Image (tube, rainbow, N blue to C red):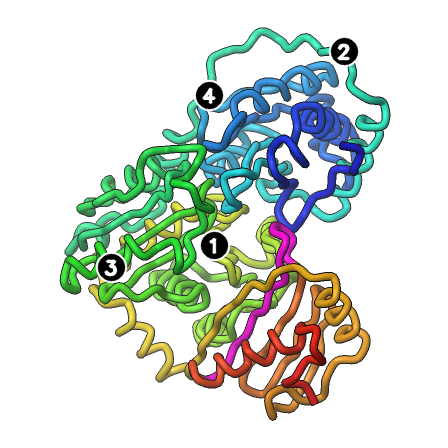
Amino acid sequence: MKEPIRFGTSGWRGVLAEEVTLPRADALAEAVARWLGEPGPRGGRPRGRTRSRVLLAHDTRFLGAVLAARARAPLAAAGHEPVLAESPVPTPVVAHAVRIGAADAALVFTASHNPPAYQGAKVINAWGGGVTDAQVRRIEQHARRALARGEAPAARAPAAGPAVDLVGPYLERLLAWLDRAASRRAPAALVYDALHGTGAGVCDRALRALGARVETLRGERSPRFGGAAPDPVPERLGALAARVRAHGGSALGLATDGDADRYAVVDADGSLLTETESLALLVDRLARTGRLRRGVAISIATGSLVERVAEAHGLAVTRHPIGFKHLARALAEGAAEAAGEESGGFAVDALGRDKDGILACALFAEMAADEGLPLRARLRTLARRHGASACARAALRVDPRARARLARLAATPPERVDGARVESVDLQDGVRLAFADGFLMLRGSGTEPVLRVYAEAPDRARLARRLAAGRALLSVDGGAGAE
């Protein structure tokens, strides 16, 4: 395959044996090695260092162990110190190791929540978050040169030392940071769905260490993920919701995706919380317990309830383009100490600067034990104090004509949508139309071959209409819904 290696919103991904092949993965590893040798803001070499200690890890996907092992040779040839992690391992565990200085960077072979046929890689830079856009461009340039040269003779990898345990130090620091006394007040029953991913044996272990009674679903790690994408979305969480309902209102449901960087929460009645609702609860909990003082970074597709809750606690809020790498940078620069997004990503600077589904699940276990269930009781309180908000997102099949309509909308945004006046337009990441009572955002996904529609409205009825209007704006029959 002669196509260049291109990163999306969160790393490089593609179908295994098509986009992701052994020679192309080798080229990426060489590109990362060369980028790490570059000083300056676009390069990856830590200041004052001539070589980097690089963690190599993988999730449960096919060929993950092979790809991680092969990456050792080009890294060592470039003068770096490649270190294999005990894997499969959750991506946030690897990011945590870089955050606390156990390594200077990491290359993790994972396709996160994508379907089983996918493979890919994430690059974690020296501050413990995803690489910046400028750094991505440098890595892509090096990869193009490596691919243009063709397959190089196999480099000899250094003798492998023992694989490094990253999970133990991660759990030790996580449990020390959590409020373990509050977690043991009245531990709720928890049902945890690992979706056959790397959270199995790590997230449930953390929950049990907090004193919770945990029932694990789909806890067998598998490269096939049960035949579907390891994505904690409603259509994949039916079994989790059913098990929670079977407890009759006394249990909480938690889930993580394939590499455990995303999370989802199912309340005691079996209903799934939206990402905005979950994030608002996390921000409120951390602010009330004194663990959040500086500020919060959120994506531009996150609902305004999070913003209103944070500001009520006196916290500064900054909004950033979609892609957790932007939020990670805000954490690294000290502009915020917690970050969250519309797709189930959450991080706290003290523990890591990349999204961490295990941390989020542990905080919800703490919250349930200390404040009781259902969580919607607390959400109703937040809505009364700060105003109601309903948020959702939808995915549409990629169609060239729909992409053309998106480009035309960016050039000529509508003045009204579904009767609501467009008060402002943001084009930094797709098309975001702001209204007095919410927003509508349309963009191409950076991780999957779909177009995404995000919306916020004061209630679910108006939210449904707004989502429908967004779909209509991208339809090929003229885009009803805009004025």
Amino acid at dot 1: Phe
4 or 2: tag closer to the N-terminus: 2
Amino acid at dot 2: Pro
Residue wearing tag 4:
164
Look at discs 2 and 1 and give the one toward the viewer: 2
Q: Start and end of the magenta stretch? A: 445-458
Q: Residues within 10 Å of mark 1 (few under 14, many from 20)?
A: many
**Up/down of 478 relative to 36, above or below:** below
3 or 1: tag closer to the N-terminus: 1
Rendered image quadrant of residue 385: bottom left
Amino acid at dot 4: Val
Judge by depth and name the residue closer to the eye, 464 or 210.
464
Which residue is at 35% across, 66% downward? 288
> SS class of the residue under badge 4?
loop
3 or 4: tag closer to the N-terminus: 4
**Disc 3 versus disc 4: distance between alpha carbons?**
34 Å
Q: Quadrant of the N terminus?
A: top right
Find the residue positioned furthest to the front.
Answer: 477
2 or 1: tag closer to the N-terminus: 2
Which residue is at 84% across, 29% downward? 145
The reply to whether discs 4 and 2 touch (Cβ–Cβ < 8 Å) is no
Which residue is at 61% across, 41% downward? 127
